[in-house]
Every structure is written in C-alpha cells, then in structure tokens.
Amino acid sequence: MVSLNENIRTLRKKLQLTQDEFAQKLGIKRSLVGAYEEGRAEPRAELLQKMAVIFGITIEALIGTDLTKTEPKIPPTFNRGKEVLVITVDHDRKDNIEFVPVKAAAGYLNGYADPEFVKELPRFHLPVLKHGTYRAFEIKGDSMLPLMPGSIIVGEYVEKLNEIKSGKTYILVTQHEGVVYKRVFNYLEENGKLFLVSDNRQYAPYQVDGEEVMEAWSAKAYISVQFPDAEVKPQASVEQLASVVLDLQKELFQLRSGKNLKK
C-alpha cells in the first residue's frame, strides 16, 4: 500500500532538505510538514502539486507509487532541465484538462511550468477519453482547415519527442513559434528536426529543432461551436504532405551542398 507521508519524508531527505527548509519552499509552517510526514494530516491538491514540482516528479508518482523502494520516474521535458509537467487535479485526485485559450497562449510560454499559472487556467473533464494527461488549446487562423478558427484541440501529453508519429497532428509549444497546431513529420534521428505542415497548402511547411520544443501534445479530440462547411475539404492528403516535406528536405540538402562547394 502506498504511503503518501512516507513518500514525502523520503523525497525530502533525498533532496537533503530540513523540514524547515522544505516548509519555506512550500510557503507553509514547519509544523505542517511534520504533520504530513507523520500522517496526521494530508496536503491539499495545490500543495501536492508544489511538492511534485520540488521533487521533480509527477503528482501521480507522488501519490500512487511507493517511492521508498523505487526511484521516482521523472518525465522528460525536452529542453527545460529538471522542470516537470504541471497539472491540476479534482477532489478525487483525477487529472483535470486545463484549457489554454488564444489570449493565454503567449503567457503559457513562460507559465507552462509554473503551478500558480496553470492552476488559474480554466479546466474541465471529458469522460470519453481514456486514462492519461490531457490539455486543451484554442487554435487560431485557417492553416488546419477544415477545423475552423476558434476550435479547441484536446491533446494527450507526449513524454518523449521521439514518440511523435509522422503524419499525425500535434500541439507543440515551442520557444520561437509559440503554441502551434500542425501535422508533424519526425526526423529527429536523421537531423534533430521536426517538420511542421499545415493541411491548408496555402501555408508553407517549416522545420523546428527538437531542442526548441518545450511540450508536445498528441491531438485526440476537438471541440467547436462551428460546423465545418461541407465544401471545405483538406487541401492535401498525408501522403502528399509527406512528399512536400521530402522535397523541402532535398532543397535544404542541395542548398547546404552548394555552400560547401563554394567553400
């Protein structure tokens, strides 16, 4: 049986923090830390999230795994050191789906790893989704028709970038492009890059370095108050888009080869 109080005590000691130092990081009294570690009280969801961030693990691992016998598994976040995915939970300790509207997208680039920022986001549940960690993002523009601007994409958290499947759609949180919803082609093993393609061929594909990606969410569902126009159809198949990406790669290779010859 998992003992939350033992997990808290074990991880605090692994970080070589006194109860007083740990309490200061949490913004609570030392006596509360003692109560949590002795099992006389149980921290609320917001405080559990803060603990998880300090320990460098997920909240699920903190409350659901016996960490006195095993090492905690830290989910990788690609290029942000030891920062972990921040989530909120309901009264039953089930993950919420936090919603990032367009107006909050710019702030999300700086606040995605900040528990205080994330807990202020709207949240909801979708019972049709299987167990997992999800987040919802509002999209803008018409680059992914027939999905209309203002549609909400619900994505499942991708722990490792190399798990991205070419041709599938993802929400990527990137340093320079911001929050984008694209069809992604994975060339990380070949050149460390992802190629991002719009279903609307009026938008040119482009590439991003894997190191620029802070979060990735695999699209699982969408919500929209607008029904797609029957006449609006995707302007390219996945096969055609893959061909575009390959052509783009060839052009880049030729450009690089030309520069090398000039040298």
Image: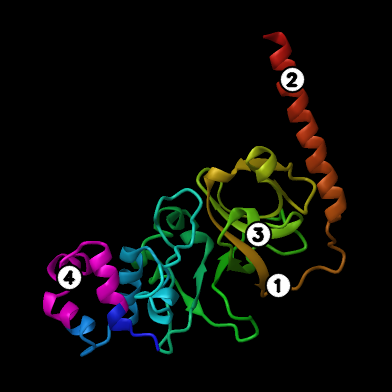
Mark sitting earlier along the chain (4/3): 4
For numbered disc 3, what is the local secondary structure? strand
- Rendered view: 174 above or below 33: above
Q: Is residue 207 left or right of residue 97?
A: right
Camera-side mark, 2 or 1: 2
Please give left or right for residue 72 compared with residue 7 in the image.
Answer: right
Q: Which residues are magenta?
A: 7-34
Q: Front-most of 13 and 188? A: 13
> Which residue lies under the disc numbered 1?
226
Query: Could you tell me the amino acid type at mark 2?
Result: Ser
> Comparing marks 1 and 4, which lies closer to the viewer?
4
Which quarter of the image is occupied by the N terminus? bottom left
Residue 166, image x, y percentages: 74, 54
Label 1 close to label 3 by CB (< 8 Å) = no
Which one is in front, 108 or 113? Answer: 113
| Residue kind at label 3, given as amino acid type | Tyr
Q: How much space separates mark 2 and mark 1, taking CA atoms?
A: 47 Å
> Disc 2 designates what residue?
257
To which residue does mark 4 refer?
Answer: 23
**Disc 2, disc 4: CB below 8 Å?**
no
| Residue ID for mark 3 | 170
The x and y percentages for residue 76 are 49, 57
Residue 186 part of the magenta segment: no
Question: Which of the two labelled residues, at mark 2 and mark 1, occupies the earlier sequence position?
Answer: 1
- Going by the numbered disc 1, the residue's amino acid type is Gln
* Residue 235 visible within the image: no
Foreground label between 4 and 3: 4
Examine the image and state in which quarter residue 161 appears. Answer: bottom right
